[in-house]
């Protein structure tokens, strides 16, 4: 509703940002549920850029 004034690129960026944040939270929750994965380095998994 409040996205009327924004252009599509801005909306896309906001949505992408939100999705990335949600995915990060989900990954964090998953790693928290698994024992011994807190200090594991990311093996180049996140290749988005």
Image (cartoon, grey):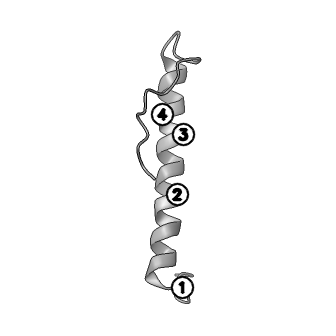
Q: Quadrant of residue 32?
A: top right
Q: Which disc number belongs to residue 27?
A: 4
Residue at disc 4, secondary structure: helix
User: Residue drawn at (53%, 81%), measured in percent from left and top?
Assistant: 3
Residue at disc 3, secondary structure: helix
Count every numbered label the image shows and give the total: 4
CA distance for labels 4 and 2: 14 Å
Tag 3 or tag 1, which sits nearer the N-term?
A: 1
Callouts 1 and 4 close, C-beta under 8 Å: no
CA distance for labels 1 and 4: 30 Å
Callouts 3 and 4 close, C-beta under 8 Å: yes
CA distance for labels 1 and 3: 27 Å
Residue 15 in picture, x, y percent from top left: 48, 65
Q: Which disc number belongs to residue 18?
A: 2
Tag 4 or tag 1, which sits nearer the N-term?
A: 1
User: Residue drawn at (52%, 77%), measured in percent from left and top?
Assistant: 10
- Find disc 3 in the rendering and name its residue: 25
- Find disc 1 in the rendering and name its residue: 6
Tag 2 or tag 1, which sits nearer the N-term?
A: 1
Callouts 4 and 2 close, C-beta under 8 Å: no
């Amino acid at each position: 509703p409040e996205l009327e004034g924004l252009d599509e690129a801005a909306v896309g960026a906001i949505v992408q940002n939100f999705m990335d944040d949600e995915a990060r939270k989900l990954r964090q929750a998953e790693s928290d549920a698994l024992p011994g994965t807190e200090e594991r380095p990311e093996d180049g998994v996140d290749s988005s850029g």
